[in-house]
Image (cartoon, rainbow, N blue to C red):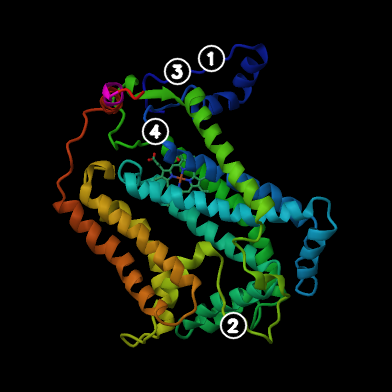
Amino acid sequence: MSFPWAKNYEPQQPLMKWLDAKLPLPRLVYNAIGAGYPVPRNLNYFWNFGVLAGAALAIQIITGIVLAMHYAANAGVAFNSVEHIMRDVNAGWFLRYAHMNGASMFFIVVYLHIFRGLYYGSYKAPREMVWLLGVVIFLLMMATAFMGYVLPWGQMSFWGAQVITGFFSAIPAVGDPIRVWLLGGFAPDNAALNRFFSLHYLLPFVIAGVIILHIWALHIPGSSNPTGIEVKDEQDTVPFHPYYTAKDGFGLGVFLMIFVALTFFSPNLLGHPDNYIPANPLSTPAHIVPEWYFWPFYAILRAFTFNFLWIDAKLWGVIAMFAAIALLFFLPWLDSSPVKSSNYRPLNRIFFWILVVDVFILGYCGKSPAEQPYVILSQLCAAYYFAHFLIILPIISRIERPLPMPNSITEAVLAKNADASSAPATA
Ligand code: HEM
């Protein structure tokens, strides 16, 4: 940790002294999330979502491991094994619904975490590596969720796998062999189900490993904050424990209440009813849709309806969808403004909110059938998405005149408190 005033760990009890000498685990925890980690004193609730994402991953791993004890990864019995979990296994319905809705909660908090980063410029130096590792985590999460959705072997599982792996065949010459290699056959079947299960079990642990790197990279500069001004002295910080353990604990309570309400009262709200029909390769559903968290990307994938520059529309769709995520890797260099927080960037703030609306419209189009007006709308919104990152952001980061900024985090906090205390008292 680079803060010179960070407290040193001094074990008190003999057992802790012994452990610290042999394996300094308590020291590691103390310096990472304890009183030895100074954090800006002005973090708002948007800084809760990293910890909540970690909690969501833990819930997914625990429920997933127990589900795997009862699930059978065989195309002949997979669907029935999930029904067996729901009906016969003790609390099996709860495990399954918690895992299903846990995936949605995971994506909700990670999307909020990403958009927090976009608004407050958390991706900028000196935290570029934190952001880059975050994008890697996001890609791994998408792969894990896609493969997980195939496992119950319902209609959407099968046809989702069919459509998504089908896009690989758009790659000229090598596309078809790649698809057959990925699936282990000419269509999703037992081989595909087995490898998807194996990877779906493995990837969350890879994600956990990348999270350790993500937090390690964060601990080098320390957290940013809503002003975007870097910490200057001890006054600007408070120890992580007890201040942010309490604040994150409160956030975790709210998160769990929403999660539990969804799991117990409306467990199928975010799912698709067709996935309660066993997979049938001979009956294509009228309308194949992925899970909600993929809708914006699915809209971009389907936005190309015409061949262009001798490249097939389908291939353009695949390129655009991967590019939509890949461009996030370049974000720290696309936005050259020295000011991080959009609180002081009036133009960036406006375009940030336009981007949010754009992504929501893309999501709506991804959920809707591939017909007008959704096709034209997804084309416009996909074009805007790319324009935002590749044209608008680089331009506004050069021409924008930021608002006056406080000199330090403490000055910003004290000014806010002074405003509050000088406000007229109400009866
Ligand atoms: C499993 C997924 C993830 C976990 C568990 C996780 C965890 C965390 C934690 C604990 C923090 C510190 C607390 C906070 O700022 O909220 C953090 C910060 C950060 N994360 Fe993540 N993260 C995840 C995914 C991502 C993704 C997908 C991105 C971006 C694409 C990302 C970008 C960042 C950035 C830029 C920061 C620094 C924020 C700042 O200090 O301003 N993270 N993350």
Q: What is the span of residues highlighted in magenta in the rendered image?
A: 419-424
Say whether disc 3 or disc 2 marks the residue closer to the N-terminus. 3
Q: Nearer the viewer, mark 4 or mark 1?
A: 4
Whether pointer 3 and pointer 1 mark residues with C-beta atoms closer than 8 Å, the reply is no
Q: Secondary structure at mark 1?
A: loop
| Local crowd size for mark 4, using a 10 Å CA cut-off: few (<14), some (14–19), many (≥20) | some
Say whether disc 3 or disc 4 marks the residue closer to the N-terminus. 3
Q: Which residue is mark 3?
A: 7
Is residue 133 in view?
A: no
> Residue 32 in magenta?
no
Residue at the image point whose x is 42% and y is 41% from the top: 46
Q: Secondary structure at mark 4?
A: loop
Q: Is residue 105 left or right of residue 407?
A: right
Whether pointer 3 and pointer 4 mark residues with C-beta atoms closer than 8 Å, the reply is no
Say whether disc 4 or disc 2 marks the residue closer to the N-terminus. 4
Q: Provide residue 68's location: percent of width, then percent of height.
A: 75, 56
Residue at the image point whose x is 54% and y is 28% from the top: 28
